[in-house]
Amino acid sequence: MPLLEVDNLTQLFSGLCAVSELKLCLEERELVGLIGPNGAGKTTVFNIISGFYQATQGEIRFQGRNLAGLKPHQISALGITRTFQNIRLWKEMSVLDNILVAQHYHLGYGLGGLFFRTPRYLKREKDIRIRAFELLEIFKIDQFAEEKPTNLPYGMQRKVEIVRALSSGPKLLLLDEPAAGLQATDVNELITLIRWVFDQFDLSIWMIEHQMKVVMSLCSQISVIDFGSLIASGTPEEIQQNQEVIKAYLGDEQL
Ligand SMILES: Nc1ncnc2c1ncn2[C@@H]1O[C@H](COP(=O)(O)OP(=O)(O)OP(=O)(O)O)[C@@H](O)[C@H]1O
Ligand SMILES: [Mg+2]
């Protein structure tokens, strides 16, 4: 059974067809890409999968389960987490709290634990903190754990978002333009980090990215959409040589 099946997915916005009869499959332990011109519908696909939009038509199945009608927190609890094209961190909370709050969605204790601080609650809370710190260390942002995210450079905020998405142990991690706004040296570091994450964790990664260096060096398969429709899918080499893709998109992008 595929990890994720996107079937006949269509999203209309008052007459505009942002995603059109899209059909895609993702297997377990895959690192794959989604590319296409601005406004092609890439973020909309992620917004539907993660429960932020309800599709006009079509079906998404995750590990065989239909995701229709589920809220974002329910989908994240099932094992799909994401980052956002426009970073969405809670500005008033510290970096560490941003991560801890996200993890509380996944805890197995009720409000009783929270109020009465049962041993089980305290043990879980300790484990979660240790895990969050481990991830922050790996991403070299542990020294900023108590900082507000807005005090950090953009590149670090992107890392905090990735740590937050990883902290609950997802089976599928959706990255929406993780390299956007990064300096060239930070892009190289990001490529190494994403590769490391993929090697270390038992998950699949699906990333949207305009920086071809990132997609082409990391992804085994790439899907290309234009005006909401799939126009090609294949290996990085196949995609780079596909005439329709070159015409619709790659002609303008730096390879
Ligand atoms: N909530 C919404 N309401 C109305 N239109 C929307 C909404 N979200 C997206 N759109 C429109 O749907 C189309 C696809 O947008 P989307 O953000 O998915 O593109 P994208 O491929 O992610 O582009 P980019 O590379 O610029 O991020 C665009 O025309 C956009 O304006
Ligand atoms: Mg987008």
Image (cartoon, helix red, strand yellow):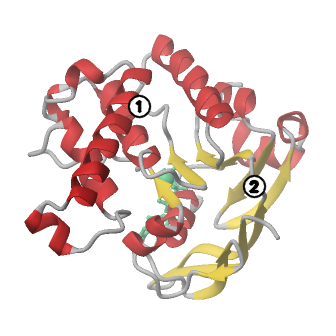
Mark positioned earlier in the residue sequence (2 or 1): 2
Residue 96, horizontal then vertical, whole percent: 22, 38
Residue 108, horizontal then vertical, whole percent: 36, 68
Counting other residues with Cα less than 10 Å from the Cα at mark 1, is it few (<14), some (14-19), or many (20 or more)?
A: many
Left or right, 198 with respect to 173, comes to right
In this rendering, the answer to whether 101 lies above or below 56 is above
Left or right, 9 with respect to 124, comes to right
Q: Residue at x 62, y 80 (%)?
A: 10
Q: Considering the image in quadrants, where does the N terminus appear?
A: bottom right
Q: CA distance from mark 2 to mark 1?
A: 22 Å
Residue 38, horizontal then vertical, whole percent: 54, 50
In the image, the residue with mark 1 has its CB under 8 Å from the nearest atom of ligand 2: no
In this rendering, the answer to whether 235 lies above or below 103 is above
Residue type pointed to by label 1: Leu
Q: Residue furthest front?
A: 119
Instruction: Name the mark on residue 194.
Output: none
Can you identify the residue that label 1 sits on?
135
In this rendering, the answer to whether 43 lies above or below 138 is below
Residue type pointed to by label 2: Glu
Q: Considering the image in quadrants, where does the C terminus appear?
A: top right
Left or right, 170 with respect to 141, comes to right
Quarter-of-image position of residue 253:
top right
Mark 2: secondary structure: loop
Can you identify the residue that label 2 sits on?
28
Q: Residue at x 66, y 85 (%)?
A: 58
Q: Residue at x 61, y 40 (%)?
A: 201
In this rendering, the answer to whether 141 lies above or below 96 is above
Q: Residue furthest top?
A: 185
